């Protein structure tokens, strides 16, 4: 392809060359070197004529757009018109591109914190490494710490790594990326400091159409001040402005609603990107693909064939110095109410009208609103205690110096939830999450019903559970999808065995799996909201858990103690047995699953 072909700028700030949009059935080789995520979006947005619906350009005289609503940090309409078909004036469009290009300025608020250093900057570099960021972009760190640009770059450089399969140009890429990174020191509640940031951003943006993304990597207490100052002093004048907000989104329904109301004084709902990094996990995103694009699964996805569904999360370490933060929230707020409940909603939702973000989120909200209120008798809470194993002593939760003495905050919880709709009526959805357990793992386990009148039941003895099929989706670590089936062991006798039909990602795909933050940052830049949480989703989630949390705290329910490194409190087994369920991760054969 000729290098001189003109480019077109999308509303997302990603530039596409005419070679990417000329033909609907372009060969795959056309997209080599192009970010795969952007390519998927480009293909999905094509019109019947093969032209991308999201490809737009700045028409002369429409540089400044009208606002949708009179709010300080609003979603700016770019004032752009659809591209004409490529054969009708590519040369004119190319010259227009020269007059008005777009740029994206990414400001990490709280840049000196652990999340920024360990996740956000490395994710931005990975996107740059894969050519997923726009041609023109700038990364700014903003925090109260005094730091120069060079000091920020040194800090960031220590956390950057390159893709395993593309390390030959790693140092060059790092150097190029770090040249785009800058730092501005300021207070989170100072409009003057944000105005100074705005001035620096404009210097880098020059005369381009400016789009701005703010990532609030700060404690929730700072959110409102930072948003207020950014809205009044550092929002884009002629492009979009978006804000990524990290969890926790409040402690209960009331505080969450108050936070949402405060944010909406300065932001439109479509500008708020509430991030739950678990929704960016590869296997979570693959969940709807597995179900809706495979005929073998969708007909089975109901109460008729599924006996129970389990959502399991375990860490093999305790709070270890983070106890002060964790003690304010506990495992139910930290893991269940967001990560596991979001995965449950994706798993159980009806088929959406389309893959559009709003259609998917509408179906998730329907699931959450159909869920039965949690009862205390359907919940078990626990807290890890000290334990000595192999000559090594492991501390209890209360041994953490940042944790208040006599704290009743649970570090483990198990719960049975039910969805009162036609598809899932009567099917127990079991959640289990805990710290300081025997292993680190996150997975979804779908246990199917017994085969009616099973001809081979004698081969399994009295334990019919061993004869049931089970679909396991391992989210982390060592990502995999496998289906447990029954088959005959070779030989003259009739001996049955339980085997796995296994998709092991590391063996099947040589490409390194992107970190969840990479996917979510790219989605935010592109304006894709499918994996972010809408305010009514958040309300529905808190409505489910708030009464339970209030009852636990008001009654001061004491958590059941369990040894550090164990499988959790015994009460979790009784809870599962109450609904005739066996935890999938406790089977003896679980140790041998691949």
Image (cartoon, grey):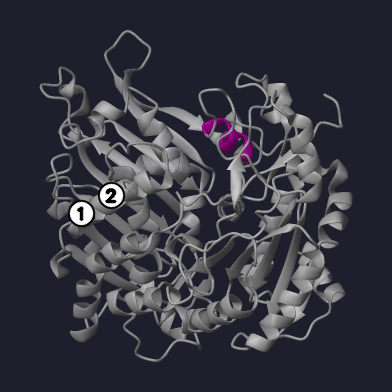
Report which residue position mark 1 lands on: 576
Q: Is residue 192 above or below residue 488?
A: below
Q: Is residue 43 magenta?
A: yes
- For the N terminus, which image quadrant? top right
Q: Quadrant of residue 487?
A: top left
Sequence-wise first label, 2 or 1:
1
Q: Main secondary structure of the magenta part?
A: helix
Q: For the residue carrying disc 1, how many other residues have a C-alpha within 10 Å: few (<14), some (14-19), or many (20+)?
A: some
Query: At which x and y percent is residue 378?
Result: 17, 63
Q: Is residue 298 magenta?
A: no
Q: Quadrant of residue 576?
A: bottom left
Residue shown at 52%/62% (left/top)? Answer: 75
Q: Nearer the viewer, residue 39 or 45?
A: 45
Report which residue position mark 2 lands on: 583
Asked if disc 2 and disc 1 are in contact, CB closer than 8 Å, the reply is: yes
Task: Answer left or right for 548 relative to 539.
Answer: left
Q: Nearer the viewer, residue 71 or 389?
A: 71
Q: Nearer the viewer, residue 257 or 334?
A: 257
Task: Answer left or right for 126 relative to 281.
Answer: right
Which span of residues is magenta-colored? 38-44
Query: At which x and y percent is residue 255?
Result: 34, 80
Mark 2 falls on what kind of element?
Answer: loop
Query: At which x and y percent is residue 491?
Result: 36, 10
Residue shown at 41%/79% (left/top)? Answer: 262
Task: Answer left or right for 559 relative to 228.
Answer: left
Query: At which x and y percent is residue 248?
Result: 43, 72
């Amino acid at each position: 392809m000729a290098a001189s072909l003109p480019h077109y700028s999308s509303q997302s700030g990603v530039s596409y060359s005419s070679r990417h949009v000329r033909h609907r059935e372009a060969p795959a080789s056309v997209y080599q070197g192009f970010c795969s995520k952007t390519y998927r979006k480009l293909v999905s947005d094509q019109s019947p004529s093969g032209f991308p619906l999201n490809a737009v350009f700045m028409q002369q005289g429409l540089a400044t757009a009208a606002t949708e609503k009179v709010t300080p940090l609003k979603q700016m309409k770019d004032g752009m018109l659809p591209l004409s078909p490529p054969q009708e004036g590519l040369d004119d469009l190319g010259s227009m591109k020269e007059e008005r290009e777009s740029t994206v300025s990414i400001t990490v608020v709280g840049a000196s914190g652990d999340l920024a250093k360990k996740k956000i900057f490395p994710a931005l570099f990975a996107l740059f490494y894969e050519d997923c960021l726009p041609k023109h972009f700038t990364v700014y760190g903003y925090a109260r710490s005094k730091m120069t640009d060079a000091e920020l770059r040194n800090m960031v450089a220590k956390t950057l790594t390159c893709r395993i399969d593309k390390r030959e140009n790693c140092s060059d890429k790092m150097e190029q990326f770090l040249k785009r990174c800058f730092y501005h020191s300021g207070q989170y509640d100072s409009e003057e400091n944000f105005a100074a940031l705005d001035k620096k951003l404009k210097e880098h943006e020059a005369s381009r159409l400016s789009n701005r993304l703010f990532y609030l990597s700060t404690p929730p207490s700072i959110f409102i001040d930072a948003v207020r100052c950014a809205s009044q002093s550092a929002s884009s004048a002629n492009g979009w402005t978006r804000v990524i907000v990290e969890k926790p989104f409040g402690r209960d329904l009331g505080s969450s609603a108050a936070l949402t109301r405060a944010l909406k004084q300065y932001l439109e709902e479509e500008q708020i990107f509430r991030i739950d990094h678990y929704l960016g996990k590869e296997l979570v995103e693959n969940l709807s693909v597995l179900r809706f694009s495979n005929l073998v699964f969708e007909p089975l996805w109901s109460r008729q064939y599924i006996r129970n569904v389990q959502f399991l999360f375990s860490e093999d370490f305790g709070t270890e110095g983070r106890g002060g933060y964790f003690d304010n929230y506990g495992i139910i707020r930290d893991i269940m109410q967001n990560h596991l409940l979001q995965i449950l909603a994706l798993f159980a939702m009806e088929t959406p009208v389309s893959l559009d973000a709003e259609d998917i989120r509408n179906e998730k909200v329907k699931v959450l609103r159909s869920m039965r209120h949690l009862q205390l008798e359907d919940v078990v809470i626990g807290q890890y205690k000290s334990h000595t194993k192999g000559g090594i002593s492991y501390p209890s939760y209360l041994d953490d110096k940042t944790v208040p003495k006599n704290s009743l905050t649970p570090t483990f919880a198990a719960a049975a939830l039910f969805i009162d709709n036609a598809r899932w009526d009567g099917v127990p959805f079991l959640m289990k999450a805990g710290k300081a357990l025997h292993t680190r793992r996150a997975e979804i386990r779908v246990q199917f019903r017994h085969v009616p009148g099973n001809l081979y039941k004698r081969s399994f003895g009295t334990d019919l559970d061993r004869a049931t099929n089970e679909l396991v989706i391992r989210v982390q670590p060592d990502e995999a999808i496998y289906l447990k089936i029954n088959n005959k062991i070779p030989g003259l006798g009739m001996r049955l065995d339980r085997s796995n039909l296994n998709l092991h990602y590391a063996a099947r795909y040589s490409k390194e799996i992107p970190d969840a933050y990479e996917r979510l940052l790219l989605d935010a830049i592109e304006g894709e909201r499918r994996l972010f949480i809408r305010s009514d989703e958040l309300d529905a989630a808190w409505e489910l858990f708030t009464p339970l949390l209030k009852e636990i705290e008001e009654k001061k329910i004491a958590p059941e103690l369990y040894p550090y490194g164990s499988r959790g409190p015994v009460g979790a087994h009784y809870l599962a047995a109450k609904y005739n369920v066996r935890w999938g991760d406790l089977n003896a054969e679980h140790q041998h699953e691949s």
